[in-house]
Image (cartoon, helix red, strand yellow):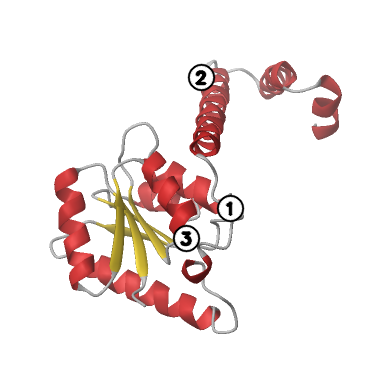
Amino acid sequence: MKQQLLLIEDSPTQLITIKKRLENSGYEVLSAGTVAEALVLAYDEHPDLIISDIVMSQINGYQLCRLVKSDPELSSIPVILLTKLDGSVDRFWGMKSGADRFIPKEPGFPSLLTACQEILEDASRDDNMQVSPHSVRHSKKKPSAEDINSRLNQLLERLLFEATITDEVRKLIDQSLDIDSIVERLFDLMSSVLNYDACAIAV
């Protein structure tokens, strides 16, 4: 049985190019142009490896990776993040999201092919006494489209919440307040989103 990869890329041209390169290297490749499509395939097929572009509309590759790694049903699937970005900050966020590798796009994709081989070989050794995710893909009940949309909405809501809190904290720092005032304002901010008793315990 060929090892099965799931490729997520919102550029049709890039999707075709990368998919063909992977198929020519002997892999079976499922492809998706959106995160929603990718999640349907991930739950349905339980691929051996997920490869995702980072820069995508609505939900990016970092966020997709966080969603996969936080779901017990998908968390064992390795994830490669593929991007034109190559800065240390981008690598940091790639690893913080739980990605197994962060690979820059390049002509011929040699680094991607090497990473695929290494990750799948490691996974094969780890699974010698276990059943691989791909081989048991039909043993679990698939989530409905409504379930997947609900999970995506929950992720978007959480990201919005995190962005809002980060923005509020940044505003406090920009005001150049003394440390006591900052702590007091932070406590007020926490109290506005948490139960007061829970906030007091946390502090």
Tell which of 107 and 188 is nearer to you: 107
N-terminal-most mark, 2 or 3: 3
Is residue 192 rendered to the left or right of residue 89? right
Picture layout, residue 175 above or below residue 150: above
Residue at 50% x, 55% y is 98
Q: Amino acid at mark 3?
A: His
* Residue type at the position of mark 1: Lys
Q: What whole-number distance in Å separates the C-alpha atoms at marks 2 and 3?
A: 46 Å
Q: Which of the 4 quarters of the picture holds residue 184?
A: top right
Q: Is residue 34 left or right of residue 76?
A: left
Residue at 23 percent of width and 49 percent of height = 84
| Mark 1 burial class by Cα count in 10 Å: few <14, some 14-19, many 20+ | few
- Where residue 202 appears, as percent x and y from the top left, is 80, 33
Q: Foreground: 18 or 98?
A: 18
Of labels 2 and 3, the one closer to you: 3
Q: Nearer the viewer, mark 2 or mark 1?
A: 1
Could you tell me which secondary element the residue under label 2 belongs to? helix
Image x and y of residue 156, in percent: 50, 30
For marks 1 and 3 on the same chain, the one whose residue lies earlier in the sequence = 3
Q: Which residue is mark 2?
A: 174
In this picture, residue 58 sits left or right of residue 194: left
Q: Is residue 109 visible?
A: no
Nearest to the eye among marks 1 and 3: give it. 1
Residue at mark 1: 141
- The amino acid type found where label 2 is placed reads Asp
Q: Which residue is mark 3?
A: 46
The residue at the point 58 percent across, 49 percent down is 70
Distance between the alpha carbons at the discs numbered 1 and 3? 12 Å
